[in-house]
Image (cartoon, coloured by chain):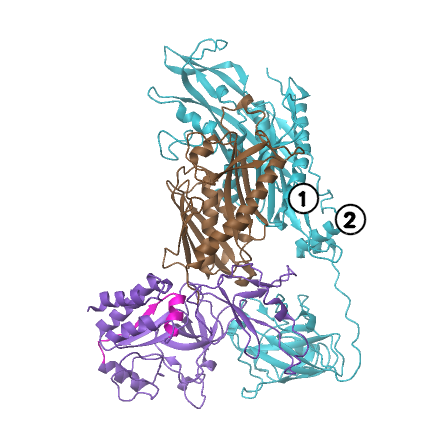
Chain colours: A brown, B purple, C cyan
């Protein structure tokens, strides 16, 4: 496993009793997630679907008890998995996914948690051998106004992206500064945060983009927001990262396991 | 059955990957000019399915693994080799099941925990060479709750409620320990190294006699993961490092069921426990992923458990 | 007589389909279990037998056909009779039994029946000797395939005419197909009559709740939402640091607290504005009485995030300073407390797209809310509110609004080429059930309300500014489609602003 700072630390099947499990650590923000997938299992009659498998996602927080934030995270993960898993292979069964947030820099920040949760879940589904239509990968990008100050960034983490627009001149202002896998500090200086998930074929599975500039609100917040064409450029770059590098990370992680 | 074991690392196929080598085999030409026979179209084994939604890539792998393409047999078959930890029943798998209860027409048995129970209809339970089934009341074996039965999967389909098993001949049936009995069926091999799969059909006297002789040894049924099951079933290839290491220290007898259950019997209770612990630790360490196929780890575990 | 719940099992073309649950019906009582030979004399003997009806029309008299029926429930000991017969006629069918199984006794899971003749309906009485066949589970008959073996060169008679339904029955039986047929028209129309890019008309009423500091009621089609805002004074204890309350308000992605633990108190987690969504009983049949389910919790979290991402409310207007005269804004004035806003959204009626309606209600309620003037009293060391003086909240000038779309994918057809997708603006609950892919865009318009008039904001750029995009579920949407959705979102936001204007929300 290469120790490039952009490649997450992945440990496959740390839980011997579950059907598929994975521990994922984001290299920069040190968010660690442990997921476990079990299935196909017997399902409660009230949750039974006649032609499909029921998918159940449970997110357990690092501190405190599960609240509305965890329900939202599970519903986002559930909708992504529904388009990846072939549920008609095992009708009237249950596929149960449990994700435990082991360590997070900031337990209340949704953007920092979403990407590791999705990636870890996809890996453990692969290990468990649940029938899937394709694989997907997720990446978290933050757009900054200026290069990050006083924060160490790894090589290759920061890159510049030309803004969308008619003029093709690449001046300083016409470029956005994008940081991949930001940690909490960088996110605090960012203008906007984008979590994008793409399948191997380039289909869009999930987008969670939000404006996150600092400020005390009210009239000072007028004028915030980004342009849609900038976003599309960013999404294209995210697609390239997911489809090429993300799938490569998956292949490398699985290559260590024997198949027979 | 897989033709090769991949110790090196051929290309990993992920779900949704395009497999160009399979598309021409789907629709073969009418007749092969050389042999003048019509080649049959490709058969898809586990791991591959047809996907009508993407006409350009009709064959879709749905698990990760390596592609296993067999073209030298009568009908070319492609499948994805992978071993998910969860057992998926498929026809003609030999399995080791536990009896839960008996109803008027079948035995209800547990195939794996967390899945609905499977059934063995009495008509599918053959008790003697003449092909008599267990349907008639007097020929029905009187199995206690919790008895172990070695059976074969006969019907499985995703829309059916229960998996159906059968006991088609004398090689299957109730599993009881046969050591130290004088009236044993002849299909049991005795060797010092390791015993191959052998079973016995229950009959009242034999059972009682064996139990009387070895009242203190209870065979153990161990639950293991699917990769470990494949390893133990492939005695000469995959399983050789571990099995030879264990059998060198402790002779034992085992029956492997594809559903992740292993029945282990040995001369004394301590030896049974030793074998069980060796297997269990090997399984939890996933030692087959090591470079040498688990040889070093297997010896280390055996040394630790059985003592030098 | 046979009840009307018969199922047609089609011919060989349908052989791959496994989804025809065969409904069993009782034609009378079941005391005829011992009648094994099953020969009937037409209608009279139909009574008392349970069976499978197979449409065998299209099969010519002289062709020999095979019928394979598989029962997936091996517990059922179904006994096939020695002959099946045509409903209402004497034509008999001879079963072909397995050689080593007793005739008329089928205890395995399939039975081959060989019959000859031209038939419209083949009725196969199934005589059950075990109670398990009388279970409530339907009996699946996956492989009823009729494969005519043509002996002579005769052509088959024409297939029977298809069944026809009324539109309401069609919509109930097959809602997905109903919706697709509508959208495949040109121009595509939705069953509720709108075009795909057309959103519902909405009405807004503000300040209807007398005990809330601000309120709004929004109706969009059949979705109705009430939002009430109540402010509570939060006094800071003498040793506390005010920044701990402000941190989440300033940086919406995180909440780094000095105190550390989550959930330590209502205002310290999640800042000073707390949102709560409740789907009241009776709003929809999917959400019965009980604790908030997944949708209500997700919505609460989403709206909370929206309030903080958009920074609608200026933090300064929530602070309570230690000064007597409010016109004197000294930078060194100490913060003695905060106004904590509790935003409660109650959904009265749910017909899809509650997020847009709830967000609009929140914006309108915030705009219309009037908090009493709060000041710090030095002598009593408490915050006092003036019951006669009210002031509005200081909000952003350019208000952002959300627009939600649902994506329906249409099947392949020769006209379309591949499958296409249609984005439906402002889906109602029927369309939401059929779609699994949703897109929500929060965007800001160029128009703002300045002194009661719409004016072009000095900050107006030439492009639409987007502040949040959320797409979940499915995989069919393209990035270009998101761009076109943004333009639709802009025009919807303009309509929202106009409606707000009409409410004459000018500060006192």
The vertical placement of B275 against B130, above or below, is above
Q: Which residues, given as a range, are shown in magenta?
A: B214-234
Between A36 and C109, the one lying in front of the other is A36
Question: Dot 1, crowdedness within 10 Å: few (<14), some or many (≥20)?
Answer: many
Parent chain of label 1? C
The answer to whether residue C280 is seen in the rendering is: no
Most distant residue in the left direction: B308
Judge whether residue B38 is colored magenta: no
Question: Dot 2, crowdedness within 10 Å: few (<14), some or many (≥20)?
Answer: few
In this rendering, position of residue A193 left or right of residue B30: left
The spot of residue A74 in percent (x, y) is: 48, 46
Most distant residue in the bottom direction: B130
The spot of residue C11 in percent (x, y) is: 70, 72
Judge whether residue B216 is colored magenta: yes
The vertical placement of B27 against C361, above or below, is below
Q: Which residue is mark 1?
A: C424
In this rendering, position of residue C372 left or right of residue B225: right
Circle 1 — which element? strand
Between C139 and A82, the one lying in front of the other is A82
The answer to whether residue C81 is seen in the rendering is: yes
Q: Name the mark on residue B36.
A: none
Q: Which residue is mark 2?
A: C186
Parent chain of label 2? C
Q: Quadrant of the N terminus of chain C?
A: bottom right
Distance between the Cα atoms at labels 2 and 1?
A: 15 Å
Circle 2 — which element? loop
Residue at 44 percent of width and 66 percent of height: B87
Dot 2 or dot 1, earlier in sequence: 2
The spot of residue A34 in percent (x, y) is: 40, 49
The spot of residue A83 in percent (x, y) is: 56, 53
Between C232 and B43, the one lying in front of the other is B43
């Amino acid at each position: 496993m290469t120790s490039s700072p952009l490649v997450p630390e992945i440990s496959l099947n740390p839980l011997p009793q579950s059907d598929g499990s994975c521990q994922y650590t984001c290299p920069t923000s040190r968010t660690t997630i442990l997921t476990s997938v079990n299935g196909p299992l017997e399902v409660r009659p009230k949750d039974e679907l006649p032609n499909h498998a029921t998918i159940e996602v449970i997110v357990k927080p690092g501190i405190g008890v599960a609240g509305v934030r965890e329900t939202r995270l599970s519903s986002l993960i559930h909708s992504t998995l529904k388009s990846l898993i072939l549920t008609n292979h095992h009708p009237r069964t249950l596929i149960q996914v449990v994700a435990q947030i082991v360590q997070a820099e900031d337990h209340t920040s949704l953007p920092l948690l979403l990407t590791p949760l999705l990636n870890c879940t996809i890996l453990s589904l692969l290990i468990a051998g649940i029938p899937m239509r394709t694989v997907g990968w997720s990446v978290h990008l933050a757009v900054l106004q200026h290069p990050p100050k006083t924060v160490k960034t790894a090589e290759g983490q920061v890159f510049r992206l030309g803004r969308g627009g008619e003029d093709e001149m690449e001046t300083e202002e016409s470029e956005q500064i994008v940081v991949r896998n930001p940690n909490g500090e960088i996110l605090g200086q960012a203008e906007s945060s984008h979590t994008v998930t793409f399948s191997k074929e380039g289909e869009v599975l999930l987008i969670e983009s939000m404006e996150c500039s600092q400020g005390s609100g009210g009239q000072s917040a007028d004028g915030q927001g980004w342009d849609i064409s900038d976003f599309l450029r960013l999404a294209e770059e995210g697609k390239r990262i997911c489809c090429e590098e993300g799938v490569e990370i998956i292949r490398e992680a699985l290559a260590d396991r024997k198949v027979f | 059955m897989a033709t090769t074991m991949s110790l090196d690392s051929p290309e990993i196929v992920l779900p949704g990957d395009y497999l160009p080598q399979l598309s021409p085999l789907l629709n073969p030409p009418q007749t092969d000019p050389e042999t003048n026979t019509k080649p049959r179209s490709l058969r898809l084994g586990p791991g591959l399915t047809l996907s009508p939604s993407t006409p350009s890539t009709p064959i879709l792998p749905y698990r990760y693994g390596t592609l296993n393409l067999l073209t030298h047999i009568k009908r070319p078959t492609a499948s994805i080799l992978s071993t998910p930890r969860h057992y998926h029943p498929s026809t003609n798998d030999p399995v080791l099941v536990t009896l839960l209860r008996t109803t008027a027409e079948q035995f209800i048995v547990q195939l794996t925990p967390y899945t609905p129970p499977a059934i063995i209809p009495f008509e599918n339970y053959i008790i003697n060479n003449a092909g008599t089934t267990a349907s008639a009341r007097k020929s029905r074996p009187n199995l206690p709750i919790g008895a172990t039965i070695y059976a074969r999967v006969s019907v499985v389909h995703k829309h059916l409620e229960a998996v159906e098993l059968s006991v088609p001949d004398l090689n299957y049936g109730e599993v009881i320990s046969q050591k130290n009995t004088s009236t044993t069926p002849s299909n049991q091999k005795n060797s010092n190294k390791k015993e191959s799969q052998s079973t016995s059909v229950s009959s009242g006297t034999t059972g009682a006699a064996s139990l009387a002789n070895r009242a203190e040894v209870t065979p153990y049924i161990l639950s293991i993961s699917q990769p470990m099951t494949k390893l133990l079933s492939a005695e000469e290839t995959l399983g050789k490092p571990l099995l030879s290491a264990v059998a060198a220290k402790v002779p034992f007898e085992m029956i492997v069921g594809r559903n992740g259950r292993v029945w282990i019997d040995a001369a004394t209770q301590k030896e049974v426990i030793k074998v069980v612990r060796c297997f269990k630790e090997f399984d939890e360490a996933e030692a087959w992923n090591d470079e040498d196929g688990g040889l070093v780890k297997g010896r280390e575990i055996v040394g630790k458990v059985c003592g030098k | 007589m046979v009840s009307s719940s018969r199922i047609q099992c089609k011919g060989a073309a349908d052989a791959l389909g496994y989804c025809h649950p065969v409904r069993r019906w009782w034609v009378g009582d079941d005391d005829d279990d011992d009648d094994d030979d099953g020969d009937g004399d037409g209608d009279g003997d139909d009574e008392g037998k349970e069976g499978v009806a197979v449409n065998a029309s299209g099969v010519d008299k002289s062709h020999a056909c095979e019928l394979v029926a598989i029962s997936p429930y091996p517990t059922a000991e179904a006994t096939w009779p020695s002959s099946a017969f045509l409903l209402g006629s004497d034509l008999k069918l001879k079963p072909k039994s397995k050689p080593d199984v007793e005739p008329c006794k089928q205890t395995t899971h399939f039975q081959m029946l060989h019959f000859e003749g031209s038939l419209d309906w083949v009725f196969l009485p199934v005589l059950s000797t075990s109670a398990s066949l009388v279970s409530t589970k339907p009996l699946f008959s996956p492989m009823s395939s009729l494969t005519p073996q043509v002996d002579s060169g005769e052509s088959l008679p024409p297939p029977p005419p298809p069944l026809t339904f009324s539109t309401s029955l069609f919509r109930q039986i097959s809602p997905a197909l109903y919706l697709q047929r509508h959208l495949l028209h040109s121009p595509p129309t939705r069953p509720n009559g709108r075009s795909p890019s057309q959103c519902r008309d909405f009405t807004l009423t503000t300040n209807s709740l007398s005990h809330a500091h601000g309120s709004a009621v929004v109706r969009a089609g059949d979705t109705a939402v009430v939002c009430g805002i109540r402010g509570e004074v939060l006094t800071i204890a003498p040793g506390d640091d005010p920044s701990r309350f402000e941190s989440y308000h300033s940086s919406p992605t995180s909440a780094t607290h000095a105190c550390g633990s989550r959930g330590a108190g209502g205002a310290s987690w999640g800042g000073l504005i707390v949102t709560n969504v409740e789907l009241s009983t009776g709003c929809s049949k999917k959400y019965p009485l009980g604790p908030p389910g997944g949708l209500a919790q997700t919505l609460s979290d989403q709206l909370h995030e929206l309030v903080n991402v958009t920074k609608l409310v200026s933090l300064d207007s929530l602070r309570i300073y230690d000064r007597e005269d409010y016109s004197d804004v000294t930078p060194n004035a100490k913060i003695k407390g905060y106004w904590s806003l509790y935003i409660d959204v109650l959904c009265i009626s749910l017909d899809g797209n509650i997020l847009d309606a709830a967000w609009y209600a929140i914006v309108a309620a915030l705009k219309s809310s009037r908090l009493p003037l709060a000041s710090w009293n030095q002598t009593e060391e408490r915050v006092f509110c003036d019951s006669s003086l009210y002031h509005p909240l200081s909000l952003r000038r350019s208000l952002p609004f959300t627009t939600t779309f649902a994506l329906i994918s249409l099947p392949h057809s020769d006209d379309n080429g591949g499958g296409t997708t249609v984005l439906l603006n402002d889906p109602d609950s029927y369309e939401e059930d059929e779609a699994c892919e949703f897109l929500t865009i929060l965007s800001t318009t160029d128009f703002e309300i300045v002194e009661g008039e719409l004016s072009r904001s000095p900050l107006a750029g030439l492009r639409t500014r987007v502040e949040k995009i959320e797409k979940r579920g499915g995989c069919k949407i393209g990035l270009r489609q998101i761009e076109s959705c943004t333009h639709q979102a802009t025009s919807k936001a303009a309509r929202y602003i106009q409606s707000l204007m009409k409410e004459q929300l000018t500060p006192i």
